[in-house]
Image (cartoon, coloured by chain):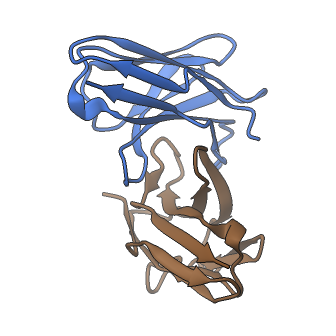
Chain colours: A brown, B blue
């Protein structure tokens, strides 16, 4: 079945450091891939998405490239800020979108 | 701000009781999905409602049931509560138009079962 595996946290970085959070997936068919972010006490917000191989999703300085050959969708940001502290979820769904599959989440803490 | 509101924000119940959680969708959306997020885990799909009918269900027992109303608001009902039902319950609304539509999440209801 469809599933997502993302690197375990927590991840602690200093402000302006480079961020990578790894995500790999298993899916039948051609999934769309997503990164969601969850700030404390809030629901999930879509950060970025990519719907086909080699697409790059980007938003707020974050980016991720849909790599079909490695079944990966790693999240990167060149310079993190304290305000980026949150839990990040990699997710996928297939065409019918009845069942968005999420990874376990990676908690990021950015220290000043 | 997603426009999806959930109530109540927190709830405490005892084992064996029944609970109803409510979700008001974003205006213009016709689909509601419910997720269970255990502490330290990613959300797990419970079920989805599209135009007032169940349109997919995850690996949850029948004591988890739902409704979607004509105004596209929704309820999640859980009977015979168990301790493991303690979790954050998230509602997500979307507009189903045949593409991989974007989900808009509410802030969730934190359910504690004692």
Q: Is residue B100 visible?
A: no
Question: Which quadrant of the figure contains the N terminus of chain A?
Answer: bottom left
- What residue is shown at x 62% (from left), y 36% (from top)? B106
Q: Is residue B19 left or right of residue A78?
A: left
> A11 or B29, which is in the foreground?
A11
- Position of residue B24 relative to residue A56, above or below, is above
Q: Is residue A22 visible?
A: yes
- Residue A10 rendering spot, x and y as whole percentages: 43, 72
- Residue B4 rendering spot, x and y as whole percentages: 68, 31
Question: Which quadrant of the figure contains the C terminus of chain A?
Answer: bottom right
- Position of residue A53 relative to residue B65, above or below, is below
> A8 or B95, which is in the foreground?
A8
Residue A32 quadrant? bottom right
- Residue A14 rendering spot, x and y as whole percentages: 61, 85
> A93 or A38, which is in the foreground?
A38
- Residue B15 rendering spot, x and y as whole percentages: 22, 18
- What residue is shown at x 61% (from left), y 54% (from top)? A39
Q: Is residue B62 left or right of residue B44?
A: left
Residue A76 quadrant? bottom right
Q: Total of numbered circles in the picture?
A: 0
- What residue is shown at x 25% (from left), y 20% (from top)? B81
> A54 or B12, which is in the foreground?
B12
- Position of residue B98 relative to residue A25, above or below, is above
Q: Is residue A56 left or right of residue B74?
A: right
- What residue is shown at x 61% (from left), y 67% (from top)? A85
């Amino acid at each position: 079945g469809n599933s997502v595996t993302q690197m375990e946290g927590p991840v602690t970085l200093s402000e302006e450091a480079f961020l990578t959070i790894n995500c790999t997936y298993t899916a039948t068919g051609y999934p769309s891939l997503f990164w969601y972010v969850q700030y404390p006490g809030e629901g999930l917000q879509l950060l970025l998405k990519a719907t086909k191989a080699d697409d790059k999703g980007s938003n707020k300085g974050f980016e991720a490239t849909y790599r079909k050959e490695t079944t990966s969708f790693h999240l990167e940001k060149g310079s993190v800020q304290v305000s980026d502290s949150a839990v990040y979820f990699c997710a996928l769904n297939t065409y019918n979108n009845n069942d968005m599959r999420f990874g376990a989440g990676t908690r990021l803490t950015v220290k000043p | 701000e997603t426009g999806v509101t959930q109530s109540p924000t927190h709830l405490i119940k005892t084992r064996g009781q029944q609970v109803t959680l409510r979700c008001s969708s974003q205006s213009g959306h016709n689909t509601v999905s419910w997720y269970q997020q255990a502490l330290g885990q990613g959300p797990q799909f419970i079920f989805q409602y599209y135009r007032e009918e169940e349109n997919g269900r995850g690996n949850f027992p029948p004591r988890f049931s739902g409704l979607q109303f004509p105004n596209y608001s929704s309820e999640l009902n859980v009977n015979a509560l168990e301790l493991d039902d303690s979790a954050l319950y998230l509602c997500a609304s979307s507009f189903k138009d045949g593409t991989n539509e974007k989900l808009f999440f509410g802030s969730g209801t934190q359910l504690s079962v004692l």
